[in-house]
Amino acid sequence: MRELSFDNVFLVYRKDNNEVQALDGLSFSVESGASVAIIGPSGCGKSSLLKMACGLISPTSGSVFIDGAPIDKPRSETAFIPQDFGILPWKSVQANAELGLKMRHVARRERSQKAASVLGSLGLGEFARSYPSQLSGGMKQRLALARALTLDVDLLLMDEPLSALDSLLREQIQDMLLELWSEKGYAQIMVTHSIEEAVFLGERIVIMDSRPGKVIAQIDNSEMGSVSYRQSATFHDRCDEIRLLLMEKKPEKCALDASCQLEEGEGVA
């Protein structure tokens, strides 16, 4: 992948007689090997733009391209970790981790070794024969991450993949994501509600306004790239900068009318 681009994207969800506009003229791009963090209020279309980037939904108008070609279906070089994990409850932890490799017709022994290695690095090795119902929420998130990390992809899309983890484990997996991104060279987009996580993992931080979502700022964060960045004055200054931007755009509380109910039902976040 050379570039993923959103070009004046509008997205409207329709259900019965209700409409919710999720995105309003969204435009930005992600270059090959870049790490982009997206942050903004709940309901501003962050999850929706990830679904468009991996070909699960299409814009109402405007276009989403990879290397100049419209995305009209899922591509094998893109991995997506959704908020609901996408884990199959009837398969074991090991089988879930191998699923993407199996769909790509990787030989059984190779996919078993790759999945076991990633599960071990995420602290799930001893649960390989367990089932998702036996895992905590944080462990399920790690399993979803493991399945994506077993694949050789050029674009990794993550929708709040670490939100259920305790603070120490969350930082450890952030460190691992940083290391993997640096080593493997894929582009990644992470949607997060954590300012600190966005600043640690995003070399560019895209800030979105409340629904209908649009880009209100893009912050260069090229100083990121090492674990020690968390302790730097630049890291804390950047967090303060983004916090102020988000506070200036803090949306009014949404009344529970029909449009809000549609938004919750359709996953516009």
Image (cartoon, rainbow, N blue to C red):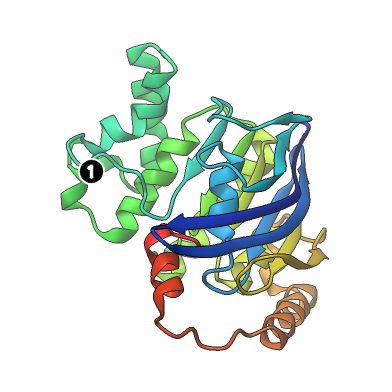
x then y, percent, for residue 160: 49, 59
Asked if residue 232 is positioned above or below residue 129 in the image, the reply reads below
- The mark total stands at 1
Image side of residue 172 versus residue 129, left or right: right
Residue sitting nearer the eye, 218 or 195: 218
The answer to which quarter of the image holds residue 237 is: bottom right
Asked if residue 29 is positioned above or below residue 65 in the image, the reply reads below
Inspect this view and state whether residue 94 appears: yes
The answer to which quarter of the image holds residue 184 is: top right
* Residue in the picture at 70% in, 77% down: 239
**Mark 1 is on which residue type?**
Phe
Asked if residue 83 is positioned above or below residue 145 in the image, the reply reads below
Q: Quadrant of the N terminus?
A: top right
x then y, percent, for residue 102: 37, 20
Image side of residue 227 versus residue 85, left or right: right
* Residue in the picture at 41% in, 80% down: 257
x then y, percent, for residue 155: 63, 37
Assign a secondary structure to mark 1.
helix
x then y, percent, for residue 214: 71, 65
Image side of residue 248 versus residue 95, left or right: right
Residue sitting nearer the eye, 184 or 117: 184
User: Given the current orientation, which residue lies at the most extreme front position?
Assistant: 17
Residue sitting nearer the eye, 117 or 30: 30
Query: Label 1 neighbourhood size at 10 Å, few (<14), some (14-19), many (20+)?
Result: some
* Residue in the picture at 58% in, 74% down: 41
**Residue position for label 1:** 127
Inspect this view and state whether residue 163 appears: no
